[in-house]
Every structure is written in C-alpha cells, then in structure tokens.
Image (tube, rainbow, N blue to C red):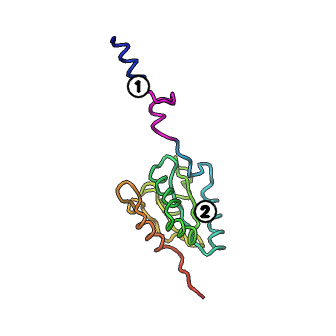
Amino acid sequence: MSIAASVSALLFLLTPPTGLPADAAAKPARAAIYDESADGGKQVEEGLVRARKENKRVLLMFGANWCGWCHRLHKLFESDAQIAAKLKQDFVVVMIDVNKSHNADVNQRYGNPTRFGLPVLVVLDAEGKALTTQDTGKLEEGDHHDPAKVLAFLNQWAPSRRSS
C-alpha cells in the first residue's frame, strides 16, 4: 500500500461518522446556564423582591458559561432531589454572569467574591445584606461537588423556620 493510500485510510478511520471534524464531535455544546446579556444588579433586585415575599434568602451563583465547574454545580442543584428541594424551599437562586468582567459592579458590591474562582456562592438575606461567601472549591470532592457538603452549606444558611 502506498503512503498516500495509507494516510487516506487512516484519515477515513479517524473521521467521525457525522462528517464533523474530530474535535467538534468530541465536545458536545453545553446549554447556556448564564444570561450573558442580563443586568446582574436588576437580577439581584428581582431576587430580593421575591425573597422578601416568600421569606427566603437569595443565593447568588457567580460564574460563566465556559466554566465547567459552574455547569457541574448547576446540574447538581437540579438533579439531586434533596438539594433541589432545599433550594426551592429556602432560596431564590440568581445566576450572575461574570464572563469578561460582565457585572463587575455586582461582583464588587459583594466584596469581589470571584477572587476565589468560579463558581462562587454568596448568600443574601431578604434585605440584600451579604451573609456569607462560599468558595465552592471547598464543596468539591474529586471531580464533582459533594452533595452532602452542598446540602450542609444550604442548611447552614437557610432562613430559620419557626412554627407558629
């Protein structure tokens, strides 16, 4: 077999059946979880209005659509039944896009939490006071966020519920 024929055969075997370049087939597009055009200040204000009305706290999740750890944490928020229930009961989740310094004013307002990396969580009371900032690296276990650590964090910062 000639070198040209060998190279052609090799290229044929390495080409994905979709006809797309190999790197395009290897990386499926992720759905955007952050609105890259949203005004973070407005998002926070809307979250606070809802939190006051529903006796909840606001959970700000600073991140960007390119951030793999942001996608992992967001997926855990939706897929873990206990975490999803806790979020629904006690928090208004506000996703703040900080790609390319977007919403830098909101980041600055809450003490530049992105200095810890992405994603980072900030819990606000219903009046907008920052109660805590969480470096989510401390919630990780290997290649994922540990559901028990995430749930413990949410339980710690949920509003107290007094029965009447």
Q: Residue at x 51, y 61 (%)?
A: 77
Amino acid type, mark 1: Leu
Q: Is residue 126 above or below residue 43?
A: below
Report the residue that reaches farthest toward the bottom: 164
Per the image, label 2 sits on a secondary structure element best described as helix
Label 2 amino acid?
Answer: Val
Magenta-colored stretch includes residue 24: yes
Question: Which x, y percent locates residue 32?
Answer: 56, 48
**Few, some or many C-alpha atoms within 10 Å of disc 1 (few <14, some 14-19, many ≥20)?**
few
Q: Nearer the viewer, residue 10 or 142?
A: 10
Residue at left offset 57%, top offset 52%: 34
Residue 72 included in the magenta stretch of the image: no
- Residue beneath label 2, please? 44
Where's residue 101, x and y in %? Answer: 52, 49
Numbered label attached to residue 13: 1
Residue sticking out furthest to the front: 1
Asked if residue 142 lies left or right of residue 98, the reply is: left
* Range of magenta residues: 13-28
Residue 146 lies left or right of residue 102; in this view the side is: left
Q: Which mark is residue 147?
A: none
